[in-house]
Image (cartoon, rainbow, N blue to C red):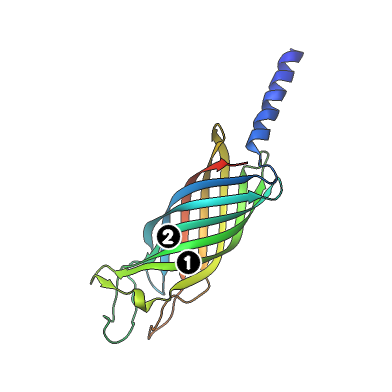
Amino acid sequence: MKKLLTSICLLLAAYFDASAQTKNNFELGVNAGVNIATAGKGANERTALNGGLIGEYYFSDNRSIKVKVSYDQKGSDDGRVTFGPGIPNTLYNIRTDYITVPVMLNWYFGADHGWYFSFGAYVGFLANAKETGTGSDIKKNYNSAEGGMSLGLGYKFKLAGKVKMLLEYDGQYGLSHIYNGNSGYNARNDRTAFNIGLMLPLR
């Protein structure tokens, strides 16, 4: 019985040691998710997608810095924007796609340091801007970049071998105006996302 208990304890210790993060480790991964985005007063939410690469460096056993490079689909449905002469006064179903770069600090907690809370900032670079009703390309009516705060809550666990899986709720809250030349009110991007990803420790 004593040998059995010792063996169980050793196995549990090995498991939690493998599950926990280690100082100076670096992980590289990919993630994809579903966005719920809106931009502008009175606009409905747009359901879209995101996906990209993740790099994460641990500077302690339960703290890390994480950088993402993501293709983020934002915009809104049934929204109204007035840009001025040459552009229809009413635009609906606006599709704006950004390359976003969030820089986040992660704090891990829980028995196996699997849960984490993220906070930081992001900058987004406009890739496309279209209005689906008229087929108009409205990229020139948007600022080329936007930014704001980013928050997240997630759980990371060992999947197989060294590969880890993450499940994450992620929010971006814009602090900068997105329109260029809008003759009415201005707006900011807001979006939440539910993400899934895979991470691989490199050292």
Task: Please tell me which residue is depicted at 47% across the width and 46% down the height of the picture.
Answer: 196
- Would residue 33 appear left or right of 80 to someone viewing this image? right
| Displayed quadrant of residue 3 | top right
Q: Element type at marker 2?
A: strand
Name which residue type carries label 1: Gly
Relative image position of residue 60 (x, y in whole percent): 71, 48
- Identify which residue is drawn at 56% across, 51% down: 55
**The image quarter in which residue 10 lies:** top right
Asked if marks 2 and 1 touch (Cβ < 8 Å), the reply is yes
Q: Say above or below: 45 vs 62.
A: below
Crowding at mark 2 (Cα within 10 Å: few <14, some 14-19, many 20+): many
Asked if residue 73 is positioned above or below residue 28 in the image, the reply reads below
According to the image, label 1 marks what residue?
A: 124
Which residue has dot 2 on it?
72
Q: Quadrant of the N terminus?
A: top right
Q: Position of residue 187 (x, y in %)?
A: 44, 76
